Amino acid sequence: MNRYEAYLPILQSSLRELDDWRTQYGEEQLVGFTDTPQIIDIIQDLRERLEGNYPFHHPQYAGQMLKPPHPIAWIAYTMTMTVNPNNHALDGGPPTSEMEKEAVARLAEMVGYENPYLGHLTSGGTIANLEALFVAREIHPQKAIAASSKAHYTHRRMCRVLNTEFMEIPDTHDGGTDWNYLMENLDKVGTVVVTMGTTGLGDVEPLADLLPELNKHGVRVHVDAAYGGFFKIIGSQLPSSNHWASLNEADSIVIDPHKHGLQPYGCGSIMFKDPSVGSFFKHDSPYTYFTSDDLHLGEISLECSRAGASAAAFWATLQLFPLSEDGLGEYMTSTVTAAKLFYRLLERSDKFECFKEPELDILAYFPIPKDETLSSISKLSTALFQAGAEAAPKEGLHLSLYKLKAKEFNARFPEYKADDETVTLLRSVLMKPEHEPFVTKLAGRLHTLLDKL
């Protein structure tokens, strides 16, 4: 029995019961539901084309932030998708709108927000961050939105969309973030984006250290925890525990359930500590919001149509994996453990070096070249990246590449000659629970591939 076959009877039974519900409204003439040979052929062609994907399901895929959703999520999504509710208004999805509110309430509880707060799901982190920056602009229309060079590029891009000034906090001489520069320019800043889990190397920016001065100057704090947000569950176990403990002091927080929350794309979320910011989303519609006097989710969002299936999938997942240390926290602990073990295995090797110890579950490393130049590291890393992807299925290794500024690399490894402005390293995101028991094989395959090169 394969990994999905066991769940098919559950899905088939649920779809039949949903059809029983549909028939209560009387017989209807179904259009396009015939089991034609053409549909069978198309689906067969689709299946064959899907096999062109990289093995996101397998722990040998240790590249980008990609993994299949948990079975309970795709079952719930598939069931709900056949009804196709729209969570923009209660008219479009009464049950899934309630599920969304319940799921967001669990997220708010996890980050430490108390009622009343404002929040909803989004189609992803980009739109969630856009909403947070939109509110930031409305509150401080004449001031800049600041973020470090390590922040996701979406912040700079969304500031262009919003036609508001973006301030990049520069790097220090060793490649760190010059937070002193920010403090010296707070009179120009309305909102600071603090990233809790950068998508490059998984860095946790110093939220707790920044808050006192930012609060003193009335600067808003937006936390982009699209990638790292669920690490709050095990925050007390992490070196950055004081920063996770301060998460509830942020004015707004973005978290993506479609990353560590076991959900299919796209499922993001945005939460605001002060619910009065909902006034910035106020609008009127001549044909929605009539079925209830309660607040409709579309009235607190820039997005209109949103998949009710995403809310149902996330809600169902939270019933199985509550946001606690012995719930989803076990998954989060496993990913951190995998990254630390991989780090130790590579550090013991005489053929690889790690850029630094991982804070969360992302690790950057490089094969040691014969001549100590940045260009040699880049060439060898790229060759190893390609060799892993081209290896036989049961011997392969799917990684990602990470480009780093030469000055940041040389601050840690001054012995390498900076013959280029950047250096390309290997990068692994160890976000699947299957990674923990597999990292020894990952390290072994890395060494085997390098020896062949």
Image (cartoon, rainbow, N blue to C red):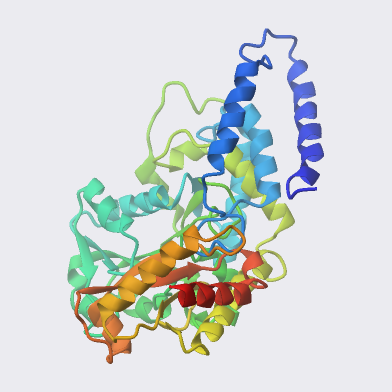
Q: Residue at image x 67%, y 73%?
A: 437
Of the 4 image quadrants, the one containing the C terminus is bottom left
Q: Is residue 275 visible?
A: yes
Residue 237: give x, y in percent of width and height: 60, 81
* Left or right: 340, with 382 as reference point: right
Vertical position of residue 340 compared to residue 267: above or below: below
Q: Which of the 4 image quadrants contains residue 440?
A: bottom right
* Farthest bottom residue in view: 415
Vertical position of residue 373 compared to residue 106: above or below: below
* Left or right: 84, with 305 as reference point: right
Viewer-side residue, 390 vs 122 = 390
Q: Is residue 199 visible?
A: no
* Farthest front residue in view: 452
Q: Residue at image x 26%, y 83%?
A: 373
Residue 343: give x, y in percent of width and height: 52, 82
* Left or right: 423, with 397 as reference point: left
* Left or right: 178, with 288 as reference point: left
Residue 241: give x, y in percent of width and height: 52, 81
Residue 65: give x, y in percent of width and height: 49, 59
Q: Residue at image x 58%, y 76%?
A: 444
